[in-house]
Every structure is written in C-alpha cells, then in structure tokens.
Image (cartoon, rainbow, N blue to C red):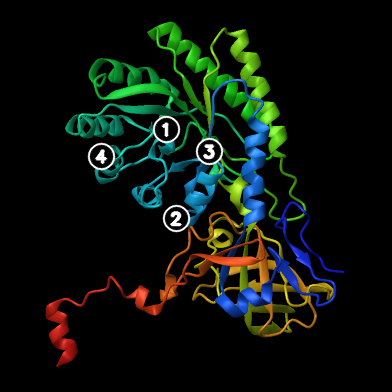
Amino acid sequence: MVSSPNTQIKPLSFSIQEDTQDVLLGNIPVQELVNTYGTPLYVLDEATLRGMLKAYKNAFASYPGPLEILFAAKANLSMGICALVQQEGFGIDVVSGGEYYTALQAKFPLEKLVFNGNNKTHDELELTIANGIGKISVDNFYELSLIDRIAKHHDKKVSILLRVTPGIECHTHDYIKTGLLDSKFGFPLSQLSSAIDKITQDYSETIDLIGLHAHIGSQIFETQPYQDLAEVMLNLCYNIREHYGMTLTHLNLGGGLGIAYQPSDDPLEVSVLAETMVSKLVDYANQISFPLPTLILEPGRSLIATSGVTLYTVGSIKTISELPKTYVAVDGGMGDNIRPALYGAVYSALIANKPNEPHNTSVTIAGKYCESGDILIRDFMAPESITSGDTLMVFGTGAYNYSMSSNYNRVPRPATVLVGHGKAQALVQRETYDDLIAHDLIPETLLTQVTS
C-alpha cells in the first residue's frame, strides 16, 4: 500500500484513476501537467482553495457583529489569486509595496486592503496613501510620523489600526511566533498609551484610529491562545474607552491556524476556531459591556497551503552503502521551497507515476542547489523501484513556497498553474534565462574590457 498523506493533506480533488493508475489533480493527470508545463511546477487545486475560503466564511458567519476576512498575501500572491479571492468576497492583507501593487494592477477593491508590516518605507506608504488603502496597521512611532507627513501632502485622512504585542505564548516554531513581548512586530503594551496620545494630540487631522491589531504566530494547533487573545484585546479596547472616551470599532485578531503537513499533525478545524473565538468575543464583550467590534481575520497558510502541490522530476540517485543511505535528487529544492532548510519544515510526498507501488524504502530527497543543507525531505518512504525520470509530488506547498522562492544559483523560478473543472490554467509563467539577466547591466568601463 502507498504511504500516502491523510485527507487533511491531500487536495480535495486528488484521486487515482483505477484503470490507468494515473494520479489526478482537478481531474487532470499529473503526468499531463508535467509534460505540458515541465518541472519543478507549482500546482494549485481550485476546488480546495475555494473550499477553504468558503469554510472560513461559513464558520465565522456566526459572529453577530460586522466581519472582514482577509487573505494574507504573503502566503502566495499573484494577480490571478487576487481575482479568485475577490470572487469569494475576501479582502487582502498586504505587507509590502509589491503586494499592494499586485492587487492594484489586478483591479482589486482598494478599500478591502489592509497594509501590515513592521517597517513600511516612505515609498510604500506614498504608493498606498496616494492610490487609496482601506486601513493601515501601524507598528511603531516612526510609521505614525510618516503617515502624517504623506497624508498631509495628499490632503487625506488615513484609517489605522495600532498593532500590539499582547505577550501571548503559543506552541509553534520560534521563527513564526509574533505575539510575544520580544518581537519585532507591534507596539509593546507599555507604549500603547503614548501612541494614542501622539495620534490624538498631533495627528488628529491626518490619522483616524479605528482599532487594534495583534497576530500571535503561525502553525497554531491550540484554541487557548485565541481565547486569551480575544480577552486581552477586548480588555485593551475597554480601557481605551474608559481613559480616552474613544470606542474603537475594529479588532484584527490575525490568523495563524495550523495545517497538516504530515499525517501526525492534528490541526484545528476552522469551525472549531470560529466557535472558540466567537463565543469568547461575545461573552467577554457582554461581560464588560463593550459593543462588538468589526472582527478582522487574516488567515493565509490555512486558506491556501493544502491546495498546493509541487511536482519535481527525479534526477541523480546516490547510494552510500557504508551508512547505508540513498540520496534522491530532484530538479528543484531550496530555491522553490526554502522552508525545510530555513526552519526544518517537514512535508509529505508521493512518487506520482507509481502511486500504488509500496512506498517502503527510506531515502533522502535532495535538491539541486549548491548547498549541503538543500534537503527537501528526510526519511522519505519511496518505492524500491524509484529511478531517474520519476515524478515526485510534494503536498501542502500552496503557502510560502512560491512567495519565498528565489533565483539562488541563477535558477529560474517555476511556473504556477491552477487546476479545476478538468483544465489547467497558468497563473505564473515559468521564468527563463532571459528573465534572469533582464535587469543586469555591464558598466561602460567594464564593457570596453569585455569587447576588447
């Protein structure tokens, strides 16, 4: 039997055709995708992505106050994804001028964008304020002064949230914890009053403080941190009203819901997260007599990760009999998936052209990049017959793979295709060698030496 991922990992439309034994995604044979688009190849399953978007909307429909759900663009953004999430009624959380510009060019409704990040530059704030932005989540005093200056220049008043670090612990990787006091993100609670004083006394003509924002981390499998967050943030809103006579109307509680990357992972269902968060918000708001704010959520990974797979072609195979150990190299690696090398992320996979052969031989899946640490999967159970030319399909790569990809070793980035309704559509074209040198220049003083 195949040591295949559980249903929390596989895309919804993943199946194996009985007569041909072809692995299908969106009812399209994987080998057809490989033959048409080449490898490495990012594939997004439309049914899974839309299913997760709908799951969030349905789960949080129980919230009795106003609700805004944003797709966290940093997980995976292209103009096509902008169009898809817009169709499903979502906003977008952007964290750079580039993400904002992508949404702008995709004709995304600008009032449904929130600009987040800990060091927004003058040029980025100029771009967003000049063209229009729904809200800006402000991280520090420096940003407040920049927004004031730019807003004055454009004769605009900007709606903002103040991002705070609530000091809440969640059991996840240190690199993806963001809600602790020792974090580069947000105002420490000790500085919140000073920030509000600055806004009300110096920036009242250009800045409209409408709410608070906190994000406690990623890959969270527990409900308690979300309950703690809801109480802490509502309590801050209550104290601000008592001290300043100001009733904040928006509360952004971030995202961070974990997904299953391997069969042992047991993430929360979206419905459980919604029930936990909504009941806590409603009960505590009633307890302190505070009106329910507009609830803003910004999930990313949990919306798109499980809709993605990456396809690779197996190349060299090296067996070290003395250890014993076998390295199986593929035609991608840390340039298209940095997460295993960056913080030890673990993935499930399948040899897609041999889905029903027993996957019972332990190998190490290595990338092609010139780094010893370029290892995609350790202790992968492969068919004994694995050979050059086989297709490796890695599950759960819809988030932070394309968005964190690079041209390390001057390797072009892969294409991205969307599969659904029995057809494949390109979202991002494969880069070419010409793309790699498109911005290269040879200074005139060097050019004469090259041509002489």
Comparing marks 3 and 2, which lies closer to the viewer?
2
Q: Which residue is mark 1?
A: 186
Question: Which residue, as the protein is rendered here, is positioned at the far bottom?
Answer: 452
Q: Is residue 306 visible?
A: no
Image-quadrant location for residue 332: bottom right
Image-quadrant location for residue 288: top right
Question: Residue 40: x percent and y percent?
Answer: 56, 73
Q: Which residue is mark 4?
A: 130
Q: CA distance from mark 2 to mark 1?
A: 29 Å
Q: Which residue is mark 3?
A: 298
Q: CA distance from mark 4 to mark 3?
A: 24 Å
Q: Is residue 96 visible?
A: yes
Q: Which residue is mark 2?
A: 79
Q: Residues within 10 Å of mark 3 (few under 14, many from 20)?
A: many
Q: Is residue 438 above or below residue 321?
A: above
Question: Residue 36: x percent and y percent?
Answer: 58, 78
Sequence-first disc among 1 and 4: 4
Q: Amino acid at mark 1?
A: Gly
**358 sits left or right of 45 in the view:** right
**274 sits left or right of 121 in the view:** right
Sequence-first disc among 3 and 2: 2
Which secondary structure, mark 4?
A: helix
